[in-house]
Image: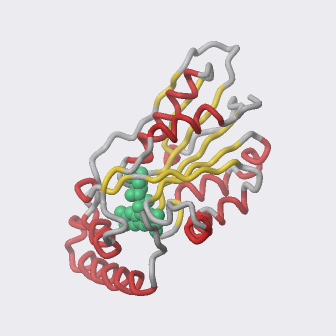
Amino acid sequence: MTQRKLSRRDFLKTAGIALGASALTCSGLSYLAALPPEFDMIDTSLGEQDTMSKKILITYATKAGSTVEIAAFIGESLSKRGFQVDVKPVSENPALDGYQAVLMGSAIRMGSWLPEAVDFVRKNQSTLTQLPTSIFTVHMLNAGDDETSRTARQAYTAPVRELLPSADEVFFKGKLDPKTLSFFDRLIAKAVENPDNPPGDFRDWNLIGDWSQSIFPTL
Ligand SMILES: Cc1cc2nc3c(=O)[nH]c(=O)nc-3n(C[C@H](O)[C@H](O)[C@H](O)COP(=O)(O)O)c2cc1C
């Protein structure tokens, strides 16, 4: 499948829609734009809770739920490798004491990690740089193997990599289901939709599972 960057035209279209949506919001219909998507934020502990096994924190930021499911899936996989794993939303601001490694994941919105995930990295930068830390990014565009796609998706995480230069990094193609989006997000998604980037669930569970087997090899 051909992947592409958001074109200037897409951005202008999107900006117009965003302005329209703000006008809608200001006009007292904010409840329409703010309707929350329905999914469960997972906050769970997995694996044998004994003091011998190493403990990993997986913390994630999501808007529509697909990143939560990826975080939980990786958690299951790491627990099968014998680790104790806590899976927590970054919005809970989890403390890092007691963990031997941290995995952070965020969905992409408009070319960036979600702000709460970047804030978490900023606040915890000194601890995260001392621990084995890995990041995963869930997105839909620029997922190809070509250089242009690679460069475009690496730009999504450049601010995070600047804070965590030695973190391992992976990108997973995610899911876009208009039914799980707020009114505002649905408008934006519609504006950038095209035949090369249709909505759907493109998460590759085999790829995610294989990657989960390979991370933190020295732990
Ligand atoms: C409003 C909106 C903006 C998005 N912007 C981008 C983007 O700039 N680049 C990209 O690759 N994917 C983009 N996506 C796709 C999401 O990253 C993808 O659907 C991801 O799986 C969402 O994760 P979540 O379900 O955990 O929120 C966007 C999706 C929406 C709804």
Left or right: 141 with respect to 185?
right
Residue situated in front as seen by the camera: 74 or 202: 202
Q: Position of residue 45 (x, y in %)?
A: 51, 25
What residue do we see at 54% from left, 48% from top?
105
Left or right: 48 with respect to 89?
right
Residue situated in front as seen by the camera: 32 or 109: 109
What residue do we see at 45% from left, 65% from top?
141
Tell me the quadrant of ligand 1.
bottom left
What residue do we see at 46% from left, 68% from top?
3
Q: Quadrant of residue 35?
A: bottom left
Residue situated in front as seen by the camera: 173 or 72: 173
Q: Position of residue 151 (x, y in %)?
A: 62, 69
- For the image, the number of numbered tags is 0
Q: Work out whether residue 109 can be spotted.
A: no
Q: Quadrant of residue 212?
A: top right
Color encoding of the figure = secondary structure
Q: Work out whether residue 216 can be spotted.
A: yes
Whether 53 is drawn above or below 9: the answer is above
Q: Position of residue 214 (x, y in %)?
A: 65, 35
Q: Position of residue 118 (x, y in %)?
A: 59, 58
Quarter of the rendering occupied by the N terminus: bottom left
What residue do we see at 33% from left, 57% from top?
176
Left or right: 94 with respect to 138?
right
Quarter of the rendering occupied by the C terminus: top right
Whether 66 is drawn above or below 183: the answer is above
Whether 37 is drawn above or below 130: the answer is below
